[in-house]
Image (spheres, rainbow, N blue to C red):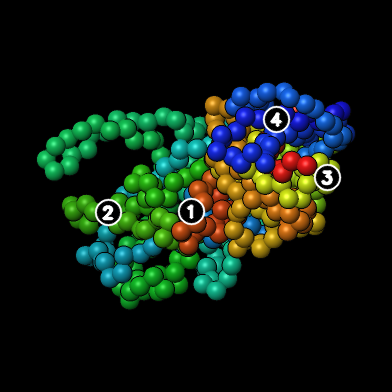
């Protein structure tokens, strides 16, 4: 197939020695093409031809050691689909204590109930089926000097101290009256999952409250290392529990004589926590992804490429025939603008990531710089056009100049916005959610728009 070169109208202040060209590339060797829709006032003045200039796409397993410590919310449950396989997640979290806060006559107090409320607003999988959430006591503590990844775990007791079986309703809400500064208003609150824990667990806690054993957080974790939040093996859905919501808490309701009280343990993003995420891709198009660096070309997965947060599933994009473009425009051409448009498949079973980033990569499909890498090109998912659009002008210019090796780019998903001024920028490579994104790499879907100027011969 041939490539047509369109000469574009551009800014009139451009020097007359330069002609502006817009390339439209169609690939026929691969179904992952560079294509172009017209922009501005296109005037077809002449044509030339370049064969098989292609964008190749491949799904890659970038790493199996994804940072998980204090990344995102609590993700608990399991769900499956034909493309990504079965994804399971459990949360390990350290509870917080109020140092020195005691309960009068705690030895004679009786526990009415112990409630762990978990607010949730996002789900994956089938919420029409019952989901069982279990709470276990940890058998080992968090280590301050240890790095926790999504394939890490902490041992916990096999028998739960509390369980809840329910049908998730993440979109449901209730109306409550909130009074602030003397004025009342009705606001919407979500229905949290309320897990009843063993009263004996609550009795142990309030008996020690205010004693030397609860003098500080370090002393408290000697008594209780934390909890694991898990689901049953037959779960059909996973939920995102918001630990910073005012509807997420662990409260012990007790009574001393006729006096009622409650004791609350801290449960928020300040706690030590991480999520363990496991994937079984058996029987899926991605079953061959076993080790970091493994890849599967989109031509072998029905012209689709796959992104998944938390498990290192990314997409590599390459321009194998870029030298042919260089021969046409010359290595002194100025790239005025280059846009890469990546279409997302609309799917009822997959929730696309909110953001995506392009990173420099090596021939071995690994991001250069690892988890501390800085993204070169950010994009926000456009729900109307169902695309990610990346401005990659500097990258294309460097390829033209020969100052960058043509080893491709890694496309990485994220639920976190990138901020160059924030110390949290490295988090975009770390654990986020369980979102899955499917990219359409069929003929004429991936598009690269290049506007450039070159001196007339």
Q: Is residue 390 among what the camera can see?
A: no
Above or below 341: residue 225: below
Q: Residues within 10 Å of mark 1 (few under 14, many from 20)?
A: few
Above or below 396: residue 36: above
Look at the numbered disc 4 and give the secondary structure of its residue.
Answer: strand
Task: Tell me the number on the disc at residue 262.
Answer: 2
> Quarter holding the C terminus?
top right
Task: Point out the frontmost of discs 2 and 1.
Answer: 1
Instruction: Give the mark nearer the N terminus: 3 vs 2.
Output: 2
Q: How many marks?
A: 4
- Among all residues in the image, which is located at the extreme bottom? 212
Between residue 73 and residue 372, name the one nearer to us: 372
Pointers 2 and 1 in contact (CB under 8 A)? no
CA gap, disc 1 and disc 3: 37 Å
Quarter of the image for residue 25 reads: top right
Pointers 4 and 3 in contact (CB under 8 A)? no
Residue at the image position 54 percent from the left and 26 percent from the top:
384
Look at the numbered disc 1 and give the secondary structure of its residue.
Answer: loop
Give left or right: position of 154 versus 101. Answer: right
CA gap, disc 2 and disc 4: 74 Å
Instruction: Give the mark nearer the N terminus: 1 vs 3.
Output: 3
Residue wearing tag 4: 7
Residue at the image position 55 percent from the left and 65 percent from the top:
139
CA gap, disc 2 and disc 1: 41 Å
Residue wearing tag 3: 327
Residue wearing tag 1: 419
Instruction: Give the mark nearer the N terminus: 2 vs 4.
Output: 4
């Amino acid at each position: 197939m041939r490539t047509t070169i369109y000469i574009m109208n551009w800014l009139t202040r451009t020097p007359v020695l330069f002609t502006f060209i817009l390339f439209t590339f169609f690939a026929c060797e691969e179904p992952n093409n560079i294509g172009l829709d017209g922009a501005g006032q296109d005037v077809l003045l002449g044509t030339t031809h370049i064969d098989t200039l292609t964008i190749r796409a491949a799904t890659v397993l970038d790493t199996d050691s994804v940072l998980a410590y204090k990344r995102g919310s609590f993700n608990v449950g399991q769900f499956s689909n034909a493309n990504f396989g079965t994804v399971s997640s459990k949360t390990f979290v350290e509870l917080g204590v109020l140092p020195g806060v005691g309960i009068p006559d705690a030895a004679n107090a009786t526990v009415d109930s112990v409630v762990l409320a978990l607010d949730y607003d996002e789900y994956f999988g089938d919420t029409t089926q019952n989901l069982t959430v279990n709470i276990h006591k940890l058998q080992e503590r968090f280590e301050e000097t240890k790095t926790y990844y999504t394939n890490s775990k902490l041992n916990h007791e096999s028998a739960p101290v509390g369980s809840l079986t329910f049908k998730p309703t993440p979109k449901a809400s209730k109306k409550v009256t909130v009074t602030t500064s003397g004025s009342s208003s009705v606001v919407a609150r979500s229905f949290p999952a309320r897990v009843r824990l063993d009263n004996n667990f609550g009795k142990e806690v309030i008996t020690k409250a205010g004693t030397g054993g609860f003098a500080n957080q370090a002393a408290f974790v000697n008594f209780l290392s934390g909890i694991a939040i898990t689901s049953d093996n037959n779960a059909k859905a996973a939920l995102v529990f918001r630990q910073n919501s005012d509807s997420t808490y662990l409260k012990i309701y007790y009574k001393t004589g006729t006096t009622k009280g409650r004791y609350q343990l801290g449960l928020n993003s300040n706690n030590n926590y991480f999520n363990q995420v496991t994937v079984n891709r058996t029987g899926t198009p991605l079953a061959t992804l076993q080790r970091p660096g493994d890849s599967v070309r989109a031509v072998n997965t029905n012209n689709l490429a796959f992104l998944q947060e938390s498990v290192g599933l990314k997409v590599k994009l390459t321009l194998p025939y870029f030298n042919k473009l260089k021969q046409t425009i010359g290595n002194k051409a100025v790239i005025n603008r280059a846009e890469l448009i990546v279409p997302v498949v609309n799917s009822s079973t997959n929730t696309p990531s909110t953001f995506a980033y392009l990173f420099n990569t090596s021939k071995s499909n690994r991001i250069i710089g690892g988890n501390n890498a800085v993204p070169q090109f950010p994009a926000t998912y456009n729900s109307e056009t169902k695309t990610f659009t990346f401005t990659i002008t500097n990258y294309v210019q460097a390829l033209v100049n020969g100052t960058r090796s043509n080893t491709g780019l890694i496309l990485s998903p994220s639920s976190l916005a990138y901020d160059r001024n924030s110390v949290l920028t490295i988090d975009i490579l770390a654990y986020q959610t369980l979102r899955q994104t499917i990219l359409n790499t069929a003929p004429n879907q991936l598009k690269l728009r290049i506007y450039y100027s070159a001196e007339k011969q």
